Amino acid sequence: MKHLLSLEKLSAADFLKILRDAKIFKAERGAHRTSPLAGQTWALIFSKSSTRTRVSFETGLRELGANVMFLNANDIQLGRGEPIEDTARVLGRMIYGAVIRTYAQSDVETFAEFAKIPTINALTDAEHPCQILTDIFTFEEKRGPIAGKVVTFVGDGACNVPVSWIFAAARLGFELRIAAPKQFQPSAEILRRAGGKVVVTEDLQAAATGADLLYTDVWVSMGKEAEAAERIRVLGGYQINAALVQLAKPGALVMHCLPAYRGKEIDAETFEAHADTIFTQAENRLHTQKAILNWCAA
């Protein structure tokens, strides 16, 4: 049985298989030769709201032949305080797999342990593995293998998205640069565990110089709203804009995992100039997550 709980635990071989299969699923959309999840029912259990994650997983599960039930935490006993392990043991006897979007990484890991069914982390405060697999697929679709390239993340370098990038860098052999203020840099423990070539700096211009990919995310993630004013103040200089893009390699990609707040982490002009890449990235959530589902269920 396979789970996708963290990129830290995903082997390089499994990375590559998912990326290869995503390419096939995209090319064969609407004409799949098999329905690998036919007759199965999967649950989406979401404590955090979502647009791209929910729509891409619901669509992907149906296109692979599965039935889907969407469960907001308030729709089930989790919302009234039932322990996650009890919910897991009940659902594990009824469904074939679960896709969970929640706050605590421990909740996803506990669910997988007690449900004993394939479990996918669709976002926690600690990691966002499906997003980074999609981002790498999108980069390689447009620019070829990511090994040996330079990826620069700009903004809150301690949140779930750059943490998953950190674990991916070690597996796939690219350089990751994180440009962030001191208080928004990843922990030394995560960097130690991950290994790989990761440069963390406050120097935004140095981090962007010669990059193959510039990447950003919102400054105020879900659950951090009380910190909004302070985050905006401290992160105010860490924006992707035309001047920063000029420092990157000619033809460098610009990505954003959305939703985007123009004028904050990226300016409107730069967002629109790279909108095709950004919305291809969003579309590719569907194809990559179908590859993840197929890998988990195999």
Image (cartoon, rainbow, N blue to C red):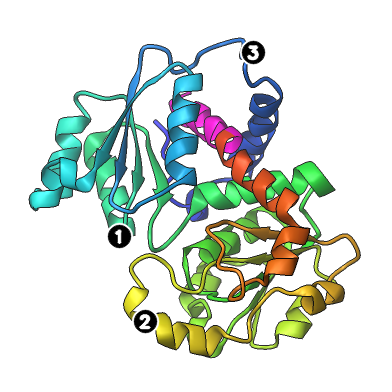
Element type at mark 3: loop
Q: Estimate the x, y position of residue 47 in percent, counting from the top left.
A: 28, 51
* Relative height, residue 143 to residue 14 (above, below): below
Please give left or right for residue 201 compared with residue 112 in the image.
right
Q: What is the x, y in percent for residue 46? A: 31, 46
Q: Name the residue under label 3.
A: 31
Tell me which amino acid carries mark 3: Ala
Res 251 seen here: yes
Q: How many labels does the image show?
A: 3
Instruction: Give the secondary structure at mark 2.
Output: helix
Magenta part, dominant SS: helix
Mark 1 residue type: Ala
Marks 2 and 3 sit apart, C-alpha to C-alpha, by 47 Å
| Mark 1: few/some/many CA within 10 Å (<14, 14-19, 20+) | few
> Alpha carbon of mark 1 to alpha carbon of mark 2: how far?
18 Å
Residue linked to disc 1: 104
Q: Is residue 278 left or right of residue 67?
A: right
Q: Residue at x 45, y 59 (%)?
A: 127
Residue 295 covered by magenta stretch: yes
**Residue 106, image x and y in percent?**
29, 57
Q: Which of 181 and 19 is in front in this view?
A: 181
State if disc 2 and disc 1 touch (CB < 8 Å): no
Q: Label 2 sits on what residue type? A: Glu
**Which stretch is magenta?**
287-298
Q: Quick one: SS at disc 1?
A: loop
Q: How far apart are marks 1 and 3 (CA)?
A: 38 Å
Task: List x then y, in percent, for residue 131.
Answer: 55, 50
- Residue drawn at x 58%, y 56% as measured from the top left: 257
> Which comes before the other along the chain, label 2 or label 3?
3
- Horizontal relation, residue 13 to residue 101: left or right: right
* Residue hosting label 2: 227
Residue at 46% over, 37% down: 55
